[in-house]
Image (cartoon, helix red, strand yellow):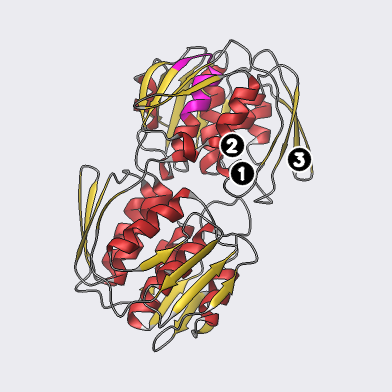
Amino acid sequence: MDKIVIQGGRRLRGSVPVSGAKNAALPLLFATLLGSGVSRLQNVPELRDIRTVAKLLQIFGAEVRCDDGSMEVDTRSVLSVEAPYELVKTMRASVLSLGPLLARFGHARVSLPGGCAIGARPINLHLKGLEAMGAEIELDHGYVEARAARLKGARIYLDLPTVTGTENLMMAATLARGETVLENAACEPEIVDLAEALIKMGATIEGAGTDTIRIQGADDLVPYEHKTMPDRIEAGTFLVAGAITGGDLTVTGARERHLEALIAKLREAGAAVTETGSGLHVSAPERLSAVDIKTSYHPGFPTDMQAQFMALMCLAEGTSLIRENVFENRFMHVCELQRMGADITIDGHTAKIKGVESLCGAPVMATDLRASASLVLAGLAAENTTEVARIYHLDRGYEKIERKLVAVGASIERVAAD
């Protein structure tokens, strides 16, 4: 199993590109199931989760072709409507096949999902919404079995603004009879990106990006061509990388409107973040000031940036408080940061971080996708050598991260573990 080895203490300088957004590409690929024909998606990151979706689409009967950041999906031969446990257990986003399969074929059998161990993340809101649209739902030996001759429009209030729940129901509603209204819907940019692709397929959607989305069902949809939005979490991770190393870094492809909450906190801490013609530029002094954050749903501070920002606060001057309000088990990176000399205490859903003057490299272990990124960031700024194990988590969400960081001055390499 590979590991990442980092020699810390180097300032990052130059330009680093952002790949296409994994969390946008996954629902876009499942959306191809809604129509019969060949859809083409550009700016697709080369990641483990993308490969998993490709395998799942092939199990359904689709033909999938990948070529240097683009994917072509031919759904004319789709026959199977079962997403097996062997694939779904590795990636929670596989549940996004449920809505499209049910809407187009009237039947779907999808294993209950797995993924990162950062919280329960139940899919009850997905199922409740589909039942409101007329689906009959049965749980059978770890599988969700859903049936509906044709879904019908409904007014659905989501108890929480779940991103995957909003995406699943939005896709299902595009082939339902009549109008569907999603209230308290997720507002993330990935929702907007999916809506734009669905509209290209012939759907009628209003309000994507707000908490109320209206979808008029169509009789059928056609294939689409679409370019995936840039990955805002990768962009945010690189902004923090520039800040934590006291660097001078341009993140090309990053969009300020996707990262307003993070940028506000970076500026509050003393980093300079400016928009350029190609993306975002960050520069920072040798030491930043401690600031507090509370994670929330978009447009609040993203939970997917909490671990990376905590690594930054470990070296800030003063004491910061980080409150995790989205997932109940997302402080698993804390004990690994403590191994590197961080001064962190946990009280329920709040972490108290007393900034230290330096971190010391150490062997650490990644526990989930964003935790692994936080350990890489800490290693970039730490003295001596940091070894990050279990980096298969990192490979689920960051495309060739070590190559990108080397290009801007980091001493980081992937090596085979003993």
Considering only vertical position in the picture, is 267 above or below 212?
A: above
Question: In the rendered view, does 391 fall on the left or right side of 351?
Answer: left
- Image coordinates of residue 280 in percent, x first then y, are 43, 26
Can you tell which quarter of the image residue 202 is in? bottom left
Q: Does the magenta run of residues contain 2?
A: no
The structure residue drawn at horizontal position 51% and vertical position 43%, both measured from the top left corner, is 369
Q: Which secondary structure lies at badge 1? A: loop
- Image coordinates of residue 232 in percent, x first then y, are 45, 39
Query: Which numbered marker is on residue 300?
Result: 1
Q: Which secondary structure lies at badge 3? A: strand
| Label 3 sits on residue | 350
In this orientation, does residue 68 appear? Answer: yes
Q: Which secondary structure lies at badge 2? A: helix
Q: Earlier in the sequence, mark 2 or mark 1?
A: 2
Amino acid type of disc 1?
A: Gly
Q: Earlier in the sequence, mark 3 or mark 2?
A: 2
- Image coordinates of residue 7 in percent, x first then y, are 48, 16
In this orientation, does residue 95 appear? Answer: no
- Image coordinates of residue 171 in percent, x first then y, are 40, 68
| Label 2 sits on residue | 261
| Neighbours of disc 3 within 10 Å: few (<14), some (14-19), many (20+) | some
